[in-house]
Amino acid sequence: MVNISSHSTVGSGSYNPEDVIFLLNEIDIAPTDVAEKERLIQSGEKHYSEMISTESAPSPEHTLLYKKALANNAVRMASEVLALANAIAREISDGPIILVSLVRAGLPLGVLLKGALLSGNRRCYHYGVSIIRDKGIDRAAMDAIACAHGTSNIVLVDGWTGKGAIAGEIKRSLDELEGYPDEPRLCVLADPCGKAWLAASADDWIIPSGILGATVSGLISRTIWPNDDGMHGCIRYGHLAEVDQTQAFIAAIREAMATLAPEAIKTAAPWSESERAELQATALSVVDSVAGKYGITNLNRIKPGIAEATRAVMRRVPEHVLVRSKNDPDVRLLMYLTDRAGIVVQEVGNDLGPYRAITVIKKVS
């Protein structure tokens, strides 16, 4: 068996080494200003994965809103992690379970799932791997995992789905590799568009780890496309160490998990074909409606779901922000960020369908 930990990677970031191994190479890349990055992306001069902007520490207000979301939703997340772990253990009944978390949003869930599976006396390995829209999953990393463990017990982990673009990228990537099922095993907490193999719910809710970046994901950057055929890259964000929430977040959810009675934990189940079709059709109709309303031909400019909408305001150049209700407590951080940036938020009620927020990226000429 290949010793994956011997690869020259960034290790485990600020996670405990037993929680995850990142199959990512540390690279040196100069930051690109957000506005310039947007221009280069939309002009086609560069792919978003070839650039990165500096990630700043969250403001005190941002941190406070994160902590409120954590206090309000820790028990829900704990319960849903256990429900997913039960389902994974049931669906993969024999042998060690290989969790492959998509960096960065999948990392906190993957760490928590590994702990839950180990507590249930299942052998489990956990890796952090890059996937990049339009370019696919890190083949070098997946080859290393397959060489070490085979492919039959691999479960891919992400935090949530938005439009399902990453789910599509996973399928396209794995179709090119041997040994994977036709329907990739993608596990998420929230799947409003019905594109995951396994989800705790279809709700668009404020997953606490979804509203921070590096400081809840091991102090590493969004992943970066390599200049060679090696593993994808990232940057270590040591300048954020003093405000790192990575370990505290995991501890808070584990503490909540410990308070739950085993008999109160349900087991999640993959969507039925009818459930999946209904979720996909409803989500697609909303995205198409937004695209039609604003004359959008590139659907990559539409970021549906609380987490995606919030991240787009933080990292991109937004033009429109739509919410179901401005009084929704789950969009407080989004409202704070848009207010600070001088962005008008439109309240559109049930027009958002399964989503509670959508951000539309500004078209840069």
Image (cartoon, rainbow, N blue to C red):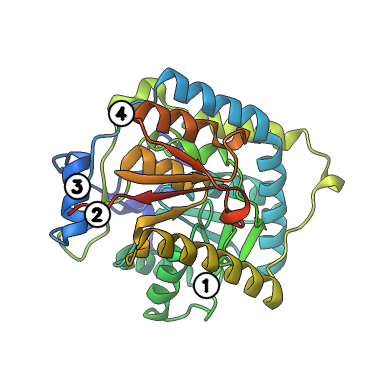
Label 2: state its secondary structure: helix
Q: Residue furthest front?
A: 293
Of the two numbered discs 2 and 4 on the same chain, state the one appearing first in sequence. Answer: 2
Indicate which disc residue 37 carries: 3
Name the residue type under label 4: Ser
Q: Alpha-carbon neighbours of circle 2 within 10 Å: few (<14), some, or many (≥20)?
A: some
User: What residue is rendered at 29% in x and 67% in y?
Assistant: 135
Of the two numbered discs 3 and 2 on the same chain, state the one appearing first in sequence. Answer: 3
Q: Do the residues bearing badges 2 and 4 touch, measured as CB atoms within 8 Å?
A: no
Q: Is residue 272 at all visible to an observer of this figure?
A: no
Q: Report, in whole angstroms, how far the alpha carbon at label 4 lies from the one at label 3.
A: 16 Å
* Mark 4 lies on residue: 56
Of the two numbered discs 3 and 1 on the same chain, state the one appearing first in sequence. Answer: 3
Of the two numbered discs 2 and 1 on the same chain, state the one appearing first in sequence. Answer: 2
Indicate which disc residue 184 carries: 1
Looking at this view, is 138 or 314 the one in front?
A: 314
- The number of numbered discs placed on residues in the rendered structure image is 4
Name the residue type under label 1: Pro
Q: Report, in whole angstroms, how far the alpha carbon at label 4 lies from the one at label 1.
A: 35 Å
